[in-house]
Image (cartoon, grey):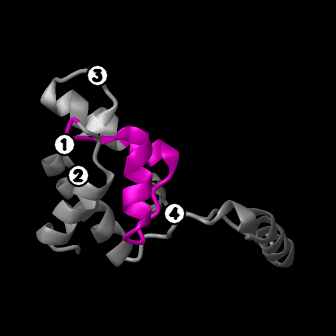
Amino acid sequence: MVPERELWQLFQRYASSTGVLIQPQIRRALNSIELYPTKSQVFEMVHCSCECSGRTPVDHLTFGEFCILTTELSEAYRKNAPAPIPKSQLKDKAALVLEERRKKRKPSGPMFSSHREMRSAIEKH
């Protein structure tokens, strides 16, 4: 978790002249503290923040929103949520996954004994 003082300095470094963090700058700011959200995640952050606050336009975050969302993203990383794979490695990763699938045998019976067990497994991922 990043201390609030550092978040404030980071926010000021990337904020627009109106004192908000516009959407294109959000990823740059987060990348500078080694958080790497996708464009979709940033869009979702901004959209949810604006929806909760009821403001328009839907294109920026305030400092408070930035703090909350940065903390949430940091927590997800801390809990070992898988980080997105850099695009440069996607081709290599896809080849490895395909090779692993080829090596595995098909299961002889059903994978899950009940609908509840299947749902639980899905929710874990």
Structural crowding at the residue carrying mark 2, measured as other residues with C-alpha within 10 Å and reported as few (<14), some (14–19) or many (≥20): many
Q: Which amino acid does label 3 sit on?
A: Pro
Q: Which amino acid does label 1 sit on?
A: Thr
Distance between mark 2 and mark 4 Cα atoms: 44 Å
Task: Work out which quarter of the rendered image holds the N terminus and state it.
Answer: bottom left
**To which residue does mark 1 refer?**
62
Mark found first going from the N terminus, 4 or 3: 3
Mark found first going from the N terminus, 1 or 3: 3
**To which residue does mark 4 refer?**
113
Residue 123 showing in the rendered view: no
Front residue (pair 45, 98): 45
**SS at badge 2:** helix
Up-down: is 19 above or below 7?
Answer: above
Is 97 inside the magenta-drawn segment? Answer: no
Distance between mark 1 and mark 4 Cα atoms: 48 Å
**Which residue is pictured at 19% across the width and 42% down the height?**
62
